[in-house]
Image (cartoon, rainbow, N blue to C red):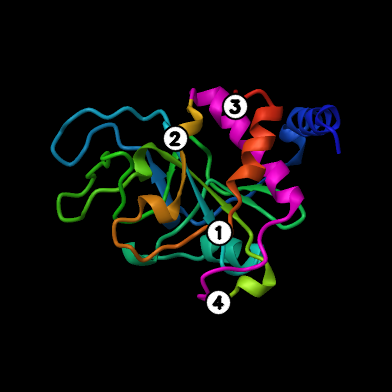
Amino acid sequence: MNDRALVQRLNTLRQGLPQRLQRIRIDASNFGERFREDAFGNPLDVIPSMVVLHETVYGLNSAINTFMTHHPNDEDQVSYHVLIGEKGQIVQAVDPSKRAFGAGNSAFNGRWVVTNAKLSGSVNNFALHLSLETPLDGEDDGPAHSGYTAAQYDALAVVLADWMDRFAIPPEHITTHRHVDLGLERADPRSFEWQKLQIRLAALGFLC
């Protein structure tokens, strides 16, 4: 496929994003408001300034069911703003204006926010979280799997382009759960190919 065809395909997908976006309502225990002050009273910017990429490990529906389940304990609460299915489905679980619980003890470029003085800092208050559905052969704790589909990379690029445009997020502020996790417990998204994303963001005009 030549560059012109790629540009046309992705721009068409981006124009149709509002119609393709499937919004779901998840349990209120699994997301929250973005804090305007940290645990020590310092003011915070509530505009998202980075994106963390994840993978579901299990299927798309399994992830959605988890988000819809009430979790009274902090350690069980989890969500992403958007999930992307293997066929390129785009599911919004948390509005970007809200705080998704995508990362625990985490930091990006030395930055984190402490919202509870009893807990470690996290990027959640200034991050957007996006998760790719894991292929069937990756539903384990192995180091790699067969990877993500072309439809997923297309949808990923379109959602990222929308966020980068809306919130002035630079490309260098797109990262992975593996990179921000300070507990060194997360390795997702496994088998992610940055070049496939970069080619698509360039086609959309978001990379030089």
Q: Residue at x 73, y 55 (%)?
A: 149
Q: Earlier in the sequence, mark 2 or mark 4?
A: 4
Residue 26 image point, x, y percent: 54, 54
Q: Amino acid at mark 4?
A: Asp
The residue pinned by badge 4 equals 140
Q: Nearer the viewer, residue 102 or 138?
A: 138
The residue pinned by badge 1 equals 55
The residue pinned by badge 3 equals 207
Query: In the picture provided, is 127 more to the left or to the right than 13?
Result: left
Q: CA distance from mark 2 to mark 1?
A: 18 Å
Q: Which mark is residue 173?
A: 2
The magenta segment:
140-168
Q: Nearer the viewer, mark 3 or mark 1?
A: 3
Q: CA distance from mark 2 to mark 4?
A: 28 Å
**Residue 134 in view (yes/no):** yes
Q: Residue at x 63, y 41 (%)?
A: 197
Label 1: element kind: strand
Query: In the picture provided, is 119 more to the left or to the right than 150?
Result: left
Q: Amino acid at mark 3?
A: Leu
Q: Residue at x 46, y 44 (%)?
A: 175
